Amino acid sequence: MTGQTTPPTTAEAAPAPDPRLQGKRVLVVFNPKSGQGESTLPDFLTLLDTAGAHVTRRELQPDTPMSEYVADLASHDLLVGAGGDGTVSSLAYAARYKDVPLLAYPAGTANLIAQNLDLPRDAAALAEVLADAHTVRVDLGEVEVKGEKSGFAMLAGAGADAAMIRDSEDLKERFGAMAYVMSAMKQLNPKKTTFNLLIDGEARTFEGIGVMVANFGMANYRLPITSDISPSDGRFTVVLLKAGNILRLLPNLIDSVRGKLGLGDPMFSGNLETLEAKTVTVEAEEPFPLQYDGELHVETTPFTARILPGAIRFLTPIKKTDLDT
């Protein structure tokens, strides 16, 4: 009939706003250098715009403190950190105790924090996690070196694990997450030294190849580093890497998986030792490189790590107990 217009088909119809996100103020802080240029972040941002969210985008710039990006965080409902583990943990530390939920958007190489939180990689699925707004409150770590403080969510370490990360830097662009495996294979004869620890005020000395101070406890594919690590118990798990090499951790991964599946007592026990602590200071007779959340830093031992109980709420589709190893 003349004058009539054909109504749009379903495919042509404009997507309706999502009432869970409509009007929500979302702050997105992203690192453009993370990963290998394959981030799904542009698609994710388009989905948020379509859903009716009010999105503020802030790109990380060199020499700008992370605290500046979240100075007005109180005027936002949700926070998204897009980048690698270093970006996410630095943002979480800057947003600590501000009670704005954080989505650890996996845009880096390994994305261990996102893996611990069992986050998807698909943009639409991540938008669903944001819209559902289910959170878990977890601890963060604070590391102090020469009076300067920084934050970490996953773990801080000195010794063989930091050397592994150092050696992986030149391989990440070509091999992605496999760079860490290749680097670990090179650590067949790592430097050994005497470590002097102060665990909640008690002195401890041991000879080994490194020390890891863990908050989250899962490596790639959510394989547990060791058992009994929880990011919400108000304590670190301090892992003492005894004389040997990084590959000797593989049997401990097997033990952890066996324990999680209820398959019996540990089969391997001599490769590492674990302790619990709220504060730990690590000194070494020979200075070691220091890493936290996969980022190698120019600082070396000694360092002090402190637990920050319940400092951040992460968005995740899983329960708090699913974060424990």
Image (cartoon, rainbow, N blue to C red):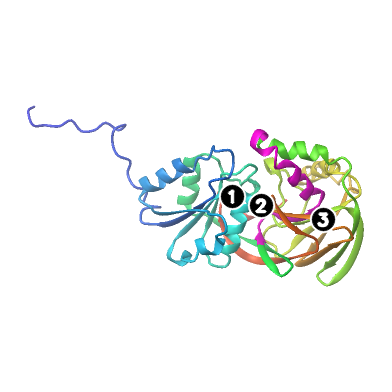
Q: In this picture, which residue range is highlighted in magenta?
A: 151-175
Q: Which residue is mark 2?
A: 323
Q: Which kind of residue does numbered mark 3 sit on?
A: Phe
Q: Residue furthest top?
A: 1
**Residue at 60 percent of width and 62 percent of height:** 93
Q: Which kind of residue does numbered mark 1 sit on?
A: Ile
Q: Which residue is mark 1?
A: 318
Q: Earlier in the sequence, mark 2 or mark 1?
A: 1
Q: Earlier in the sequence, mark 3 or mark 2?
A: 3
- Local crowd size for mark 3, using a 10 Å CA cut-off: few (<14), some (14–19), many (≥20): many
**Residue at 87 percent of width and 44 percent of height:** 245
**Residue at 51 percent of width and 64 percent of height:** 68
Helix or strand or loop: what does disc 1 sit on?
A: loop
Q: Which kind of residue does numbered mark 2 sit on?
A: Leu
The answer to whether residue 269 is left or right of residue 183 is right
The answer to whether residue 216 is left or right of residue 101 is right
Residue 288 bears which disc, if any?
A: 3
Helix or strand or loop: what does disc 3 sit on?
A: loop
Q: Earlier in the sequence, mark 3 or mark 1?
A: 3
Given residues 30 and 101, the one toward you in this image is 30
**Residue at 56 percent of width and 42 percent of height:** 120
The answer to whether residue 174 is left or right of residue 189 is left
Where is residue 163? Give x, y as percent.
79, 47
